[in-house]
Image (cartoon, grey):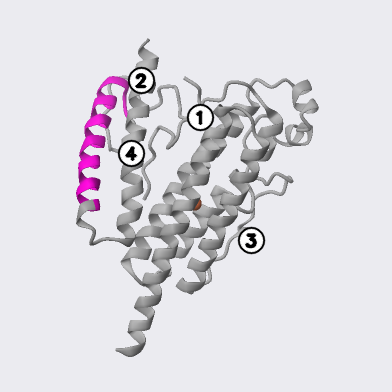
Amino acid sequence: MWIYEKKLEYPVRIKNPNPKMAKLIITQYGGPDGELAASLRYLSQRYIMPIPEAKGLLTDIGTEELAHFEIVGTMVYQLMKGASPEEIKAAGAADYFVDHGRGVYPQSAAGNPFTAAYIQSKGDPVTDLYENLAAEQKARSTYEYLIRTADGADVIEPLQFLREREVVHFQRFGEALMKVQEYLESKKYF
Amino acid sequence: MKNNERARLLDEIRAIEFMTIELNLYLDTHPDDQKALNDYNSYTKQLMALKDEYQRRYGPLSNFGTAVSEYPWAWINEPWPWELD
Ligand SMILES: [Fe+2]
């Protein structure tokens, strides 16, 4: 089971509303390379992992991604909060506003609703870990694109934190892949 | 201000917790690294002490039987994590 902790993993204190930025950042909430997809992917794949290291890692990274899902949701919430309908319209976010108001909805920057089609759980630990290496790189690229379009330390710093976590996750998945491959090789000979 | 003190303590908790998250993931793939394990245990003890202090002063950080509450039920006290404080 999971226990909720009533705090963010990294603080979000955004000073001014910015609906345009909210509409871009939402892609890491419910987009193809976003945190919801990441969490759902790892927490679904972990059942068939053959070694304890990989079972633990997928559980733990899947859990950390949920904390990132909350950080991104908080960013979207704070970026929409207090924006007037006129400001939202001027920011090009009227389409989001008519569907969701100032609420937080899992969709991509292009407006596609979240779908499990973004992820795979193939029942093959090697295949799944390769998918995860790619997923972490795609998330890193997305954060880099977001950082380039953002201004203000209050928006950029949480994005940088999230970007760095993808780099660490990539590293750990690479180690898990090597251990899983070693294990599968050893089983072949004994 | 009381609120600033609360945010400061939360930032301190986050900093120590970050070390435990990093070490936890590292230990998942390096379970025999004794030095990393000692660090993990030491940061965990610091984190538990800080959380105890926080919860004594500001109410539960976690639900479902992980922290006791004063009357009335303090779990629902604002701010929630997404709210600016
Ligand atoms: Fe990640």
**Badge number at residue A117:** 3
Question: Do callouts 2 and 3 mark residues in contact (Cβ within 8 Å)?
Answer: no
Q: Is residue A23 visible?
A: yes
**Badge number at residue B6:** 2
Left or right relative to B33: residue A11 = right
Give the extent of the magenta segment. B36-60
Closer mark to the observer between disc 4 and disc 3? 4
Q: Secondary structure at mark 1?
A: loop
Asked if labels 2 and 1 share a chain, the reply is no
Closer mark to the observer between disc 2 and disc 4? 4
Secondary structure mostly seen in magenta is helix
Closer mark to the observer between disc 3 and disc 1? 1
Asked if labels 2 and 3 share a chain, the reply is no
Q: Which image quadrant for residue A83?
A: top right
Q: Amino acid at mark 4?
A: Glu
Label 2: how many Cα within 10 Å (few below 14, some 14–19, many 20+): some
Residue B9 drawn at (x, y percent): 33, 24
